[in-house]
Each structure stands twice: as structure tokens, then as C-alpha cells.
Image (cartoon, grey):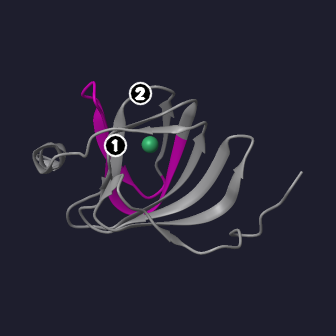
């Protein structure tokens, strides 16, 4: 067994080409047995690209407001205290609202497959009528 005390050593990482906007990730528990745990901070308007997780992902929202959307059309708001399970292979994106940052804990199992960016139109449509 291994206990991580709050965060692992190592720098916070600014996430690059598979995200839109500024996104920072802070390691909570470095990847082990294909399980990675990170706190992820999205500035307002920032979001992931469309992607799939090999096994699954669990998101737990710590603060702020955001959105989780699947390619199949399911989606909904994320606010502090919400927890989402995303099964393996499901195409989706998650990110902050246009007018709020969002921080979530992300527990990711297996590899990530990164796809196309979420267009400004698709992003705006998610928050229309929120
Ligand atoms: Mn994801």
C-alpha cells in the first residue's frame, strides 16, 4: 500500500494541446496500476478536447461550475459536490462554464484517447438555456 499526503511531489502541470484554454493539473496520486488521480483546474471557458478513457473515469467537482457532455448528446451541469462516472469508450468532454472556473478531482483508469477540439459552437450550445 501507499498513502499520498495531499499531493505528490512534482510540479503542477499546465495541460497543453488536448485542452482549450488554460488548464492546470496537480498530481494527487501519481499513476499506479493504470490509475491516475489529479486535481484539475479549468479557467472560465476552458475544456478538454473530445476524448475517451480506456477503462473509466470518475470526476468529483471541488468548486466552481462546469459541464460534462457526451458525443451521444447526454450532458449536464457540474457543480461543487457532484460526482460523475464515465464508462470506458464513451466520447465526452468536460470543462468550466464560460463565467466560472471549475476544479475537479479526476480519477482516470487506463489510457486516454484524445480526439478533436470542442468547437466554440458546441461549447456555447451546452450552456445555452442552462
Ligand atoms: Mn474525461
Question: Residue 9 in the image: x percent, y percent?
Answer: 71, 73
Mark 2 vs mark 1, CA separation in Å = 10 Å
Say which residue label 2 marks.
Answer: 90
Question: Residue 41 in the image: x percent, y percent?
Answer: 43, 66
Q: Residue 11 is drawn in which quadrant? A: bottom right
**Secondary structure found at label 2:** loop
**Most foreground residue, 112 or 68:** 112
**Farthest front residue in view:** 17
Question: Residue 77 in the image: x percent, y percent?
Answer: 31, 47
Q: Is residue 83 magenta?
A: no
Left or right: residue 119 versus residue 96 is: left
Note whether ligand 1 is within 8 Å of mark 1: yes
**Callout 2: 10 Å neighbours few (<14), some, many (20+)?**
some
Question: Residue 10 in the image: x percent, y percent?
Answer: 66, 73
**Callout 1: 10 Å neighbours few (<14), some, many (20+)?**
many
Within the displayed image, which quadrant is ligand 1 positioned in?
Answer: top left
**Most foreground residue, 120 or 59:** 120
Left or right: residue 54 versus residue 6 is: left
Point out which mark residue 93 bears.
1
Looking at the rendering, the stretch of residues picked out in magenta corresponds to 58-81
Dominant secondary structure of the residues highlighted in magenta in the image: strand
Residue drawn at the location 83% of the way across and 60% of the way down? 3
Residue drawn at the location 23% of the way across and 45% of the way down? 118
Residue drawn at the location 18% of the way across and 44% of the way down? 126
**Most foreground residue, 127 or 51:** 51
Left or right: residue 28 versus residue 86 is: right
**Most foreground residue, 29 or 127:** 29
Q: Is residue 61 magenta?
A: yes
Amino acid at each position: 500500500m501507499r498513502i499520498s499526503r495531499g499531493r505528490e511531489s512534482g510540479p503542477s502541470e499546465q495541460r497543453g494541446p488536448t485542452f482549450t484554454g488554460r488548464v492546470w493539473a496537480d498530481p494527487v496520486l501519481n499513476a499506479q496500476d493504470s490509475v491516475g488521480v489529479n486535481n484539475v483546474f479549468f479557467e472560465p471557458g476552458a475544456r478538454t478536447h473530445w476524448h475517451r478513457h480506456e477503462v473509466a473515469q470518475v470526476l468529483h467537482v471541488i468548486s466552481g461550475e462546469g459541464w460534462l457532455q457526451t458525443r451521444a448528446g447526454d450532458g449536464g451541469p457540474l457543480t461543487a459536490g457532484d460526482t460523475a462516472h464515465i464508462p470506458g469508450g464513451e466520447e465526452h468532454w468536460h470543462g468550466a462554464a464560460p463565467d466560472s472556473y471549475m476544479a475537479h478531482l479526476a480519477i482516470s483508469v487506463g489510457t486516454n484517447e484524445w480526439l478533436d477540439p470542442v468547437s466554440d459552437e458546441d461549447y456555447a450550445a451546452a450552456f445555452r438555456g442552462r
